Amino acid sequence: MTLAVDKPQSQPAPRRGGRWIDEWRPEDPAFWAATGARVARRNLVVSILSEHIGFSIWSLWSVFVLFLGPRYGLDPAQKFLLTSAPTLVGAVLRLPYTFAVATFGGRNWTIFSALLLLVPTVYAGIVLQPGVSFTTLLIAASVAGVGGGNFASSMANINAFYPQRLKGWALGINAGGGNIGVAAVQLVGLLVLATAGAAHPRLIVLIYLPLIVVAALLAAVYMDNLTHASNDKRAMRDVIKDGHAWIMSLLYIGTFGSFIGFGFAFGQVLQVQFKADFDTPVKAAYLTFLGPLLGSLVRPVGGLLADRFGGSRVTFWNFVAMALGAGTVLLASRGHSLPLFVAGFVFLFLCSGLGNGSTYKMIPAIFKARHPDDEREARRLATALIGVAGAVGAAGGVLVNLAFRQSFLTYKSGDGAYVAFIAFYALCVLVTWAVYLRRSPRRLPEV
């Protein structure tokens, strides 16, 4: 399908079949009011659903480890590796997924990437049984990493559909809806644990298989491809030469890396550190979904606050709050206070969600400030950085799980990890102030 709106100023890319829109001008108020907003909103809704399912599959093993009782013969260190593996694979896949949208089209890639989720889901259903080797489980967990790539392609696609003034809201709600997939799969796990028991993890697989098919079908029917989002193989090379790419990647480790890392590890941390209170998996499952759910719901709020007050300002104060939250968790851990421990972690989830929204608002704002007269160049570099920052930020989730693993091996508690988190958030506070808030001739306006 081709959407014809006035005569384009430049020769449109040739049609390649399917639902392609040859001209897209979101910054034109007349175009946006007449056609753009409706089409963008339709693509956003389906994108959220597909990304949501992708996050759920990516997070499957944060739930499956709760089912892996004594009959599986795994120690806590091995379980932390099972949650680290999909995080790492998902982080790596975010780079090619970012540019897959421009190569194949947002609609076409959403269909394919949704159907690809069938592979880790079916594989997990086949191998999950007592007596399976740890290596087989590690491979199954790694394959689930394909769900982590969906975020990058979805964000790159939605970034192309929306005007600059609405990117904070659009990217925030798109990412927030996807992030809820972490909480959703944990709620599904809680339902299975509470009704069927820990011996039936395959029921989770049966629930998600039809949802994956539905997401792919909806993408096929309701989504579109944009020809203007042409593939630029130099965009990644160009953006990684920019110092802001690595600064934003560092900040996104602090926000999204914390969110996904805590989301994958929280249930295990409760079971290991407060073993007496969580002697059964279902008791831990009652709490594991709460933080990811709240952190996902506030991500669009972070984008809205950034739209109003500036992304760098919101990000700065958010990292201050995260350092305080990590300090609260450390005090609760040393004082063996479960209520304060849970409250501190939930606060960290909330802050990570807000920071996810504000940092992603900063990315297009940075390149708009650097290329005020070249919308295409700003969009090209912003899309590339969304992929880079998304990949590096997701790798932060691996670091969180490895920090917990090493801390429990060394200190028999998570205290070492909490100290590391405080130090890292303090670094992010300093970097945000020095680069984006400190008065200097090189300061970028409206970031």
Image (cartoon, rainbow, N blue to C red):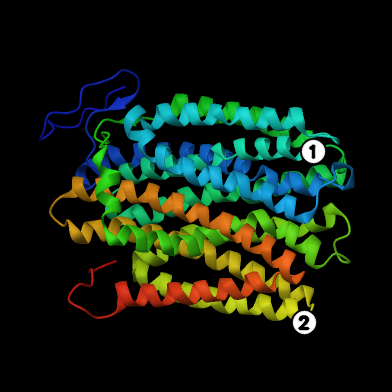
Mark 1 is surrounded, within 10 Å at the Cα level, by few (under 14), some (14 to 19) or many (20 or more) other residues, namely: many
Spot the residue most to the top: 17
In which quadrant of the rendered image does the N terminus lie?
top left
Where residue 216 appears, x then y in whole percent? 52, 27
Judged left or right of residue 168, residue 323 is right
In which quadrant of the rendered image does the C terminus lie?
bottom left
Residue type of the residue flagged with mark 2: Gly
If you read the primary sequence from the N terminus, does the residue marked by circle 2 or circle 1 appear first?
A: 1
Residue drawn 22% across and 51% down?
A: 378
Where residue 363 appears, x then y in whole percent? 33, 57
Q: Secondary structure at mark 1?
A: loop
Where residue 236 appears, x then y in whole percent? 30, 45
Residue under label 1 = 201
Residue type of the residue flagged with mark 1: Pro
Q: Is residue 303 visible?
A: no
Q: Is residue 307 visible?
A: yes
Residue 423 disc label: none
80 or 389: nearer the viewer: 80
Spot the residue most to the left: 9
Judged left or right of residue 341, residue 378 is left
Residue under label 2 = 335
Mark 2 is surrounded, within 10 Å at the Cα level, by few (under 14), some (14 to 19) or many (20 or more) other residues, namely: few
